[in-house]
Amino acid sequence: MFTDYAKITIKSGNGGDGAVTFRREKYVAAGGPDGGDGGRGGNIYFRVNPNSNTLIDFRFTKKFKAQNGENGSGSNKYGKAGEDLYIDVPIGTIIKDSQTGKVVADLSQEGQIELILKGGKGGKGNSHFATSTRQVPRFAQAGEEGEEKEVILELKLLADVGLLGFPNVGKSTFLASVTEAKPKIANYHFTTIEPNLGVVKTKSGESFVIADIPGIIEGASEGVGLGIQFLRHVERTRLLLHVIDVSGIEGRNPVEDFYTINEELKKYSEKLSKRKQIIVANKIDIMQNDEGLRALEKLAQEQKIEMFKISGATGEGVTALLNRVTEVLKTLPKEELVENDERVIYTLEEDKDEFSIRKEGNVFVIEGKAINRLMGRINIDDNESMYYFQKNLKSMGIEDELKKQGIQEGDLVKVLNWTFEWYE
């Protein structure tokens, strides 16, 4: 098992702005405000895709953004809501906040869908701000901005495919040629002393995880050589590629090798011995003669096992083998991939501190989402809008906090890019 890892940025959609419009109809002497509301921004969801095995696609696409909501318009027409974005991940994917390291979601169930970021709310049109004393509001509410977060995707992977065979038959060379894994390769036995895993991405865009299992020798099921610990790594793979050296350079008998390895599998686990296999006749580029190859072909026909002739070094026959592996994996059920660890899961929420006030020299600077949302509704050139602004400073507790920090009449206050003098 190893962890596939990706870091991505996700952003939910911005809410659309409310409209500032007034009825202008024939025979209507004094049309009132009729600005429609903006549409909400699209949400970000993560969902389990049963056909996905790896996070390899996230290495090429790093940013994901949901659609913004549309602005409102006249005649009280609402803006269209932004389209939600669904991001597909393999079962067993854990989503973490990159800043805190906390687990946001654990997608460990088939069909699971999790809401990770909510889209911004649409702003209200000016028709909402009409009162008996404010009959012509020339301001509306701006849409809320969507949330943006950097998240980490982690997937504990079990290999879909295990490379099986004696030491030095070319498993590591094959793995290095079809994945980005960097196994140690040398012409001596037991070069591989721990499993190497890599992700294969086929030309058709599909992917699967493949493991180079350390070479098994006779007696492995009893712990001889590297022993039983490595048989555990193939126990939960769905397909075995039985790599056999047919070059004859080391004097090996391909047929005997096939039976010896399978006998060890049977001794270790009856279930494992019945796992689907494909025979991979390797090193055809340096064959001394074809006797071993022909004998292995005959065995494959008798056992009704598929066989592919390849050269891991030159790449001959490799593409056909990978295409076939992809097709076979679609027909094989998946083992349970997720460990039942207890995990603390939380959701990405809006900041609890809606606003903050700090002094920058002689200027009181107000910051935070609450004040930003308020400023989105304000038309600083309109007296009624400014009255609405002052009223909200009081109701939100900002005025009280400014007084606590010692603000005096005539002091400067800065909100976003706007600076004004403070008066009661």
Image: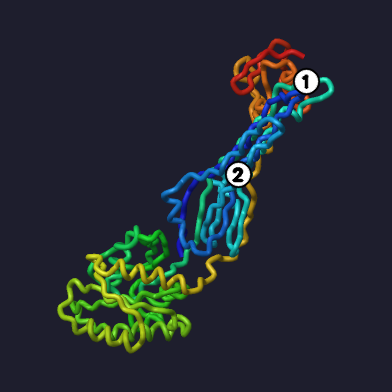
Q: SS at mark 2? A: loop
Could you tell me which residue is drawn at 32 percent across and 65 percent down?
175
> Circle 2 is placed at which residue position?
42
| Three-letter amino acid code of the residue under disc 2 | Gly
Instruction: Give the farthest residue toward the front.
Output: 27
Instruction: Give the farthest residue toward the left.
Output: 288
Which quadrant does the C terminus fall into? top right
Could you tell me which residue is drawn at 77 percent across and 23 percent down?
27
Q: Position of residue 148 (x, y in %)?
A: 56, 40
Q: SS at mark 1? A: loop
Q: Position of residue 271 (x, y in %)?
A: 48, 82
Name the side, left or right, on which 335 lies relative to 143.
left
Name the side, left or right, on which 299 lies relative to 345.
left
Q: Which mark is residue 30?
A: 1
Name the side, left or right, on which 34 lies relative to 249.
right
Residue depth check, mark 2 versus mark 1: number of the one nearer the observer: 1
- Mark 2 in CB contact with mark 1 (< 8 angstroms): no
